[in-house]
Image (spheres, rainbow, N blue to C red):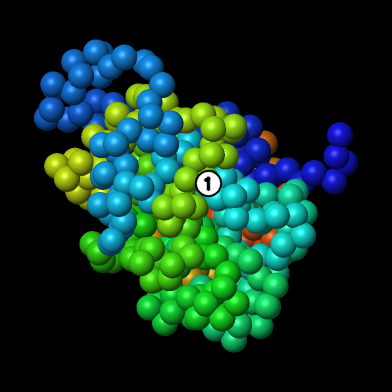
């Protein structure tokens, strides 16, 4: 067995603690929908669900669902879409399809560390460029230009970003396109938080359509509050989508029939706006409450305002390592937030606020107790 395998720490630690603590402020999505909420005002859906044959769906996604996903991306057709078991599998399969061991990629940091970890374990060389708090978690295009070399095969961005909630400006997106175009690299754009914006009802634009070698990753887990469906997708040039599908045959064959059917329903023009409005309500209200709390403890925390998602990446001003702090929080206060260590940035915490206010406030109070007992 390989001794140097790099585990996906964030996901593993989350899965151990998120259902065991009393206050889980680690999730980056909002409070998940129940089936009852999803079917609200449309009781016919229950019968349709009960009569669904639990067969294999078409393995790259049922046509109705691929149509609905394609409709979200200008110029895309169902031939560009592969439906996957969550964005996690979409990212994994896209990397497996486009890279070989020894290749070089560039990732933005901090980031959801999946692509980084898959690359490490697959023998892919990693270069990076930083998001900077002093730029509101934006990046300096010169940092990107320096990171991309003639050997770069893929640039991995997360937009809106996990963990910072930053949405790239048009200039930043253009800088990524220019950098990729200069060397003919792929852009892998993980866009799972598009739709969970704080102060605009405009969904964050996709990289799809800006550059031919784009792999756009989406999911129902975050903006659509349906993580338990395990339903994601890749939008790619049609020949690459076929190649991704060919790998999927070996990995999972396909996501579930129920997932496909419910996803098509969630993305229908009648239902999608209602789900996105619910998500935005959670992130907007939740953020206002969270910001008040942070501001009233300005000696302890520095907050750079996120623009999307139900999370903030907050710097804390205490001399304690973030993993140690979170371990104490779990064991002393039965509360869990994600340590900055899981994003390679100590002295930060990723804190979720897309949940009912009283629940979030109690979790935050408990965090305060651990931080103020540290002196
Ligand atoms: C940026 C990003 N991509 C992908 C995923 C995985 O999403 P899914 O639940 O669709 O597999 C996550 C989960 O947190 C994420 O934050």
Q: Quadrant of the C terminus?
A: bottom right
Q: Is residue 359 left or right of residue 96?
A: left
**Residue drawn 28% across the image and 17% down it:** 52
Whether 287 is drawn above or below 109: the answer is: above
Q: Nearer the viewer, residue 286 or 280?
A: 280
Q: Position of residue 141 (x, y in %)?
A: 54, 83
Q: Nearer the viewer, residue 225 or 290?
A: 225
Q: Nearer the viewer, residue 72 or 300?
A: 72
For disc 1, does the CB lie below 8 Å from ligand 1?
no
The answer to whether residue 156 is seen in the rendering is yes
Q: Quadrant of the N terminus?
A: top right
Q: Is residue 23 left or right of residue 129?
A: left
The answer to whether residue 301 is seen in the rendering is no
Tag 1, which secondary structure? helix
Q: Position of residue 208 (x, y in %)?
A: 38, 63
Whether 223 is drawn above or below 35: the answer is: below
Q: Position of residue 322 (x, y in %)?
A: 69, 55
**Residue drawn 24% across the image and 25% down it:** 36
According to the image, label 1 marks what residue?
A: 243
Q: Nearer the viewer, residue 239 or 221?
A: 239
């Amino acid at each position: 067995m390989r001794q140097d395998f790099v585990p996906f720490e964030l996901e593993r630690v989350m899965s151990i603690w998120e259902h065991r603590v009393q206050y889980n402020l680690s999730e980056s999505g909002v409070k998940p929908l129940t089936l009852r909420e999803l079917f609200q005002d449309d009781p016919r859906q229950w019968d349709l669900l009960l009569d669904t044959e639990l067969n294999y769906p078409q393995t790259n996604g049922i046509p109705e669902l691929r149509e609905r996903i394609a409709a979200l991306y200008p110029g895309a057709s169902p031939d560009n879409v592969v439906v996957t078991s969550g964005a996690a599998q979409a990212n994994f399969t896209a990397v497996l399809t486009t890279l070989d061991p020894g290749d070089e990629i560039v990732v933005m940091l901090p980031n959801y560390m999946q692509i980084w970890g898959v690359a490490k374990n697959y023998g892919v060389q990693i270069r990076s460029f930083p998001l900077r708090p002093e730029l509101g978690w934006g990046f300096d295009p010169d940092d990107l230009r320096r990171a991309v070399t003639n050997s770069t095969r893929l640039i991995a961005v997360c937009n809106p970003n996990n963990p910072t909630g930053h949405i790239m400006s048009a200039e930043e997106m253009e800088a990524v396109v220019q950098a990729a175009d200069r060397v003919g690299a792929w852009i892998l754009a993980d866009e799972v938080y598009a739709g969970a914006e704080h102060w605009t009802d405009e969904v964050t634009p996709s990289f799809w359509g800006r550059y031919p070698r784009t792999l756009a990753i989406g999911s129902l887990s975050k903006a659509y509050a349906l993580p338990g469906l395990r339903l994601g997708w890749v939008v790619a040039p049609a020949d690459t989508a076929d190649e991704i599908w060919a790998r999927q045959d070996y990995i999972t064959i396909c996501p579930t029939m129920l997932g496909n059917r419910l996803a098509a329903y969630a993305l229908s023009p009648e239902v999608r706006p209602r789900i996105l409005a619910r998500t935005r309500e959670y992130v907007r209200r939740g953020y206002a409450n969270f910001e008040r709390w942070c501001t009233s403890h300005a000696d302890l925390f520095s907050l750079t305002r996120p623009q999307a998602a139900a999370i903030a990446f907050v710097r804390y001003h205490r001399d304690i390592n973030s993993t140690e702090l979170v371990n104490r929080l779990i064991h002393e206060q039965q509360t869990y937030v994600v340590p900055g260590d899981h994003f390679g940035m100590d002295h930060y915490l990723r804190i979720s606020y897309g949940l009912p206010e009283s629940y979030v406030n109690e979790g935050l109070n408990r965090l305060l107790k651990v931080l103020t007992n540290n002196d």
